Amino acid sequence: MMDNNDVATHISKKFNQELEAVRNKVLAMGGVVESQIELAIKALVTGDMQLAELVIKQDNQIDNFQRDIDIQCTEIIALRQPTAFDLRLVLVVLSLIDELERIGDLAERVAKMAIHLSNGSVGKSDPHYELKHMAGLVQAMLKNALNAFARMSSDGVLDIIRSDEEVDLEYGSIIRQLITQMMEDPRNITRMLDVLWTVRALERIGDHARYICEHLIYLMNGEDIRHLTPAEVQDRLLS
Amino acid sequence: MMDNNDVATHISKKFNQELEAVRNKVLAMGGVVESQIELAIKALVTGDMQLAELVIKQDNQIDNFQRDIDIQCTEIIALRQPTAFDLRLVLVVLSLIDELERIGDLAERVAKMAIHLSNGSVGKSDPHYELKHMAGLVQAMLKNALNAFARMSSDGVLDIIRSDEEVDLEYGSIIRQLITQMMEDPRNITRMLDVLWTVRALERIGDHARYICEHLIYLMNGEDIRHLTPAEVQDRLLS
């Protein structure tokens, strides 16, 4: 396991600064993505369309972050020729920004659904409470994953991966509720499908947060655990 | 633009062989993913559950391909310290196997839906014809993208990216058709939602095939075009 002290002992101070700069940029990008999810959910629940528009505008920022970090990482590999942990760090960063970009796209989709839904009749029967709860779960997953990356530690990362199962249960329960509502009031099917896409987007945000955790375990432990179950991962890490 | 001759002029013959081996493995992985889509669609249309089970079993092969190629690429970067085109090639390969793995997951989802759907009443009203047509479009996108990677050429890649718009139109049309059917026969909503998830999975396979093309343009031209419209991409490549 590697901590901040080890990272600081790089022979080349300049190289160390470059890695730090990239890490900080990833965290800044993560912060924007977190705020996108926050605002998209708020737009959905309150019907405040200015918030939804803001989320869509933030997409540009995300794209710029991704492009910049991508270029910086490629330059670091070409010029610094990192190996071992440093190489894994740069490769993991390239994966993390892909995950963050896709989470940003999903937050944008939620924002667009908020706009779409607010144009219909006010949906008193929409499962707002359940949506907010599920959103809270995936937001915590992403936040904890980014914190683990900031600390450069895989402690607690397994718990984040496990909480994705809770998200999936919640997801299944909301979907069943929506199906019942569709059957009871078929005129509302189009609206219910919009809610369904929103729930689906949240569920996929949880998946990407889980992928981030899997990348982090690879970074810290050098283990590729992407195709293992949580129980197998635990065995592997404890052995 | 780079062709096979240039690739062959590497100073280190051994290094060249390693890059060739990785490229061939990506193409082999792509072949398995293509067969997964083919079989999943066949399972869906014919109701042959053995085909669906086969698709699910193939997932293991895909995971092994991804792990092997990942390790090989990391070793090449660490030991060969590639720069310029070679470095882009290795980084793009890492992205391509991610896209292929996610396409494989989506094919598996289609196969699972085929099993699910075959357990219900036979769906004469299911939009089989439209599904097959849309599947044909995304299969062609993936096939052409893999061919472009095999040829190491970005010729025609823009056309593949453009055909994703056709997929999206087809997708919208099938969804509208499904909504109408749900409203007409609410007892069938659960079944129609399964068809809807299937159509959604196909649409996302098209997205990932488009991402593969975007990676290829970056590889061949050194341009990051991920956030441009097709028209902007054309301008950029012609300029």
Image (cartoon, coloured by chain):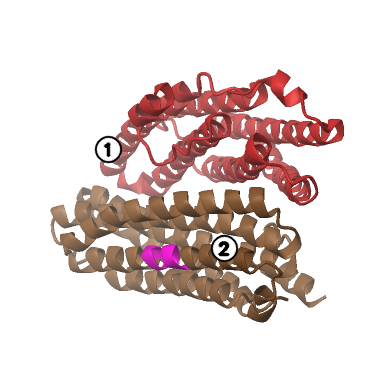
Chain colours: A red, B brown
Where residue B33 appears, x then y in whole percent? Answer: 39, 63
Examine the rendering and report whether any part of residue B229 can be seen: no
Image quarter (top left, top right, bottom left or bottom right) of the C terminus of chain A: top left
Give x and y (percent) for residue A175: 34, 37
Frontmost residue, B211 versus A180: B211
Position of A85 relative to B64 (above/below):
above
Dot 2, how many residues are within 10 Å of its Cα: few (below 14), some (14-19), or many (20+)? Answer: some
Q: Which residue is mark 1?
A: A180
Image vertical order of residue B53 relative to residue B137, above or below: above
For the residue labelled by badge 2, is the local secondary structure a helix, a strand or a loop?
A: helix
Q: Position of residue B213 (x, y in %)?
A: 59, 67
SS for dot 1: helix
**Farthest-out residue, right:** A14
Residue ID at (73%, 74%): B234
Task: Identify which amino acid the numbered label 2 is placed on.
Answer: Glu
Circle number at residue B18 = 2
Q: Residue at x 81, y 30 (%)?
A: A11
Q: Is residue A58 above or below residue B152?
A: above
Residue B5 or residue B60, whichever sits in front: B5
Task: Tell me where residue B222 sits by quadrant.
Answer: bottom right
Secondary structure, magenta segment, majority class: helix
**Quarter of the view holding residue B44:** bottom left
